[in-house]
Image (cartoon, rainbow, N blue to C red):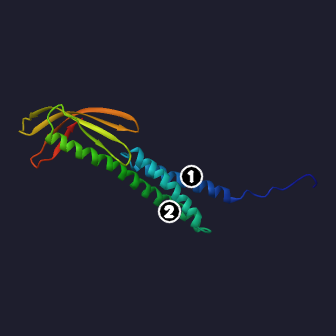
Amino acid sequence: MTGITTVPPPSAAPRRRIGLTAMVLAMVLALGACASDAGPKQTGGTLIGAAMGGLAGATFGRGAGRHVAIGVGTLLGAYLGSEVGKSLDRSDRIHAARSARDTLEYEPAGTTGTWVNPDNGHSGTLTPRRTFESRSGAYCRDYETTVTIDGRTQSATGTACRRGDGRWVMMNG
């Protein structure tokens, strides 16, 4: 039987690695799908956290437990990264809300209130255009607003009404 060589059966190890990679990617995608209102910072934080967590799991895991360590590290990293990204988006909203509240409460029509997040440079404006009393007796103001993120500005218009407790509520926009 010369000229005939036997080929050993394929190893299961490469298939396990491919299966693990597919499983980790599926978990990351599933986490991303759960956060339907995630902003770009939150999504980026999730992906970076997942990658770093997976690498940490691969570094510290040994033997058969290595796959579990990679999976747990990926999930934990994705969660922590998402929370960091979400808090940054929340910081922008806090700056905008403070400025809007003060502008709607104290500034005359035509006066523009501004906000800037010093941590990332995002900014915005709110300009009340008209003040009126609604049918229910609430004080309302039509407004124009802009938000600038990474050099791109978007604008919108809306109406805010003052509740009995003094809070301004955006009615539309």
Q: Which element is circle 2 on?
A: helix
Whole-percent x, y for residue 19 in the image: 59, 55
> Relative to 164, is 152 on the left or the right?
right
Where's the C terminus, which quadrant? top left
Give the camera-side residue of 140 and 26: 140
Residue appearing at x 15%, y 32% in the figure: 109
Vertical order, 41 against 132 (above or below): below
Reading the image, the residue beneath label 1 is 22
- In the rendered image of this protein, does residue 165 appear above or below residue 127? below
Q: Is residue 122 left or right of residue 7?
A: left
Return the mark for residue 62.
none
Taking depth in this image into account, of 58 and 156 the one nearest to the observer is 156
- x and y, in percent, of residue 148 in the image: 35, 37
The quadrant the N terminus occupies is bottom right
Mark 2 vs 1, N-terminal side:
1
Residue 64 location (% of width, % of height): 60, 68
Q: Is residue 169 left or right of residue 155?
A: left
Q: Is residue 12 above or below residue 33?
A: below
Give the answer, above or below, for where 24 lies relative to 99.
Answer: below
Q: Residue furthest right?
A: 2
Q: Along the line of sight, which residue is nearer the eye, 1 or 35?
A: 35
Element type where label 1 sits in the image? helix
- Residue occupying the point 29% across, 46% down: 93
Q: Which residue is mark 2?
A: 72
User: Picture quarter containing residue 169?
Assistant: top left
Q: Where residue 166 sits in the image (x, y, percent)? A: 12, 47
Type of the residue with mark 1: Ala
How many labels, in total? 2
Residue type indicated by callout 2: Val
